[in-house]
Amino acid sequence: MNSKTYLVTGGAGFCGSALVRRLVQDGHHVRVLDNQSRGSARRLSDIKHDFEFVEADIRDAEVVQRATKGADCVCHLAFVNGTEFFYTKPELVLEVGVKGIVNVVDACLKHGVGELVLASSSEVYQCPPVIPTDERVPLSIPDPLNPRYSYAAGKIISEMMAINYGRTHFQRVVIFRPHNVYGPDMGWEHVVPQFVLRMRELCQEAANPIRFPIQGAGKETRSFVFIDDFIDGLMLVIEQGEHLSIYNIGTMEEITIEELARLVGEYFCRKVEIVPGAPTRGGTPRRCPDITLLAGLGYQPRYSLRDGLPIVAKWYDENAHKAPKSWTAEKG
Ligand SMILES: NC(=O)c1ccc[n+]([C@@H]2O[C@H](COP(=O)([O-])OP(=O)(O)OC[C@H]3O[C@@H](n4cnc5c(N)ncnc54)[C@H](O)[C@@H]3O)[C@@H](O)[C@H]2O)c1
């Protein structure tokens, strides 16, 4: 295997740090650009001497140019993630998304970087007309007035930039669309950690079954992919993905939010009685990727949710004291 120089933007984040770890392990030279707004270099403290860390904002064109110099490949993951922020900070989500991809493409052109790997998202499909959803399903913004779609809009713009500059200016541009990646230390603003923290708190009351309030009726579905499987898939995309191709990364194990709550309850040895609440505005009723294209590169996820969830529940159970105050049990 040839050793390469990678720039990973957003490399202190949940997925980015796992990618950095794998690239370093595989003998590559890695530089990370991250402003640590959501991620933290702490995630990589045990290997901090094995890669370069540039603490900077992706919106700063000059610094992105400096960080890109000498890279063979840029993996662009820096983005404002976390559903809560799509509603509360849509301008920031778009600014980081749009300026980020413009700065990355400009820097690649300036320094003749041949390869660009872009993180997009399952959110670009919104309410997909086909389940499982393959990569050719049309992308959509159902309501421009709903701030939630700031995130999908930023991702769609990023994809269009990558593809259209990719046609003539890059040797290889590949896009991946992650579908609900979960794992230990994944952040706090996601359904899995929120359910674990709330269930943990409710467990301290005696009631069994536990009455568990959720948003909506619990019939919405998601397909969760464990971080180790996700990184296996992403490495296939990075190493073997075809020029100007898009790959879903996820699993085809579609489960309801109600089932997820029951599985979290199982970790705490409790039965769960779902208490339905108001649905979120703009939420997607079903989500399950078709992963045939990535399977063609050899991808085969190993963890079912039943395998992976207890690992993650244990991490959040043991680290509950680290939860930011606003993300403790009342939330979600
Ligand atoms: N985790 C998932 O399930 C999922 C699903 C779909 C898409 N994605 C995409 O995959 C990528 C990685 O996601 P993640 O779960 O690791 O998210 P994350 O929030 O943990 O990581 C994103 C990183 O980007 C950094 N960042 C944010 N704004 C920045 C800025 N202005 N300048 C520099 N760095 C900045 C954050 O500090 C963070 O470390 C993102 O592009 C995300 O949109 C993730």
Image (cartoon, helix red, strand yellow):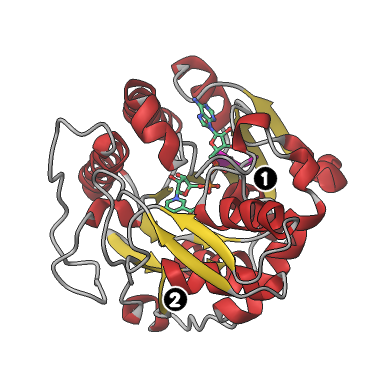
Q: Quadrant of residue 240?
A: bottom left
Residue 44 image point, x, y percent: 77, 45
Magenta span contains residue 131: no
Which residue position is annotated with label 1?
Answer: 30
The amino acid type, in three-letter code, at marker 2 is: Thr
Q: Quadrant of residue 256?
A: bottom left
Residue 262 vertical placement versus 96 (above, below): below
Disc 1 crowd rating (10 Å Cα; few below 14, some 14-19, many 20+) is many
Sequence-wise, the earlier of marks 1 and 2 is 1
Residue 98 image point, x, y percent: 31, 28
Residue 243 image point, x, y percent: 32, 61
Asked if residue 112 can be seen in this view, the reply is no
Badge 2 marks a residue whose secondary structure is loop
82 or 314: nearer the viewer: 314
The amino acid type, in three-letter code, at marker 1 is: Val
Give the quarter of the figure containing the N terminus.
Answer: bottom right
Residue 66 vertical placement versus 12 (above, below): above
61 or 190: nearer the viewer: 190
Q: Does 285 sit left or right of 139 as displayed?
A: right
Residue 206 image point, x, y percent: 73, 62
Which residue position is annotated with label 2?
Answer: 251
Q: Does 271 sit left or right of 75 as displayed?
A: right
**What is the magenta segment's predominant secondary structure?**
loop
Q: Does 203 sit left or right of 76 as displayed?
A: right
Q: Which residues are magenta?
A: 8-12
Disc 2 crowd rating (10 Å Cα; few below 14, some 14-19, many 20+) is many
